[in-house]
Amino acid sequence: MQDHIPPQPANSFRITLDLMRAERRLDAILLQAIKAQSENLTLREISRTAFKELFASGKIQIKGQNATPSSGLARGITYVDILGFKQK
């Protein structure tokens, strides 16, 4: 079976989350993944306030839809796009 990879929006940074178990909240997992990546240093240094604002302004998307901090995540691979940050 082949995984479907959704198209990445223009002017966005993609984080791929590969989870061994389902998670209740996106915000904690995503912030941890952002801090661990080294491809976009501006995004890596984001404050908690600015991170929350990304959710509030609809700049964090999963499958082209706005995500909320309390969005649950299924086990497996999830592609999260953060609008306004370029992929290096």
Image (cartoon, helix red, strand yellow):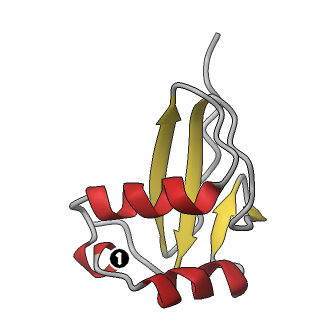
**Residue 29 left/right relative to 2:** left
Residue 40 in sight from this viewpoint: yes
Residue 62, percent from left and from top: 68, 55
Residue 49, percent from left and from top: 51, 89
Could you say which is closer to the camera, residue 40 or residue 52? Answer: 52
Residue 47, percent from left and from top: 40, 85
Q: Residue at x 65, y 33 (%)?
A: 22
**Residue 67 left/right relative to 75:** right
The amino acid at mark 1 is: Leu
Could you say which is closer to the camera, residue 45 or residue 7? Answer: 45
* Number of numbered tags placed on the structure image: 1
Could you say which is closer to the camera, residue 12 or residue 71? Answer: 71
Judge whether 28 appears above or below 58 on screen.
above
Judge whether 47 appears above or below 34 on screen.
below
Residue 5, percent from left and from top: 60, 38
Decide: few, some or many residues near mark 1? Use Cα within 10 Å; few <14, some 14-19, many ≥20. Answer: many
Secondary element at tag 1? helix
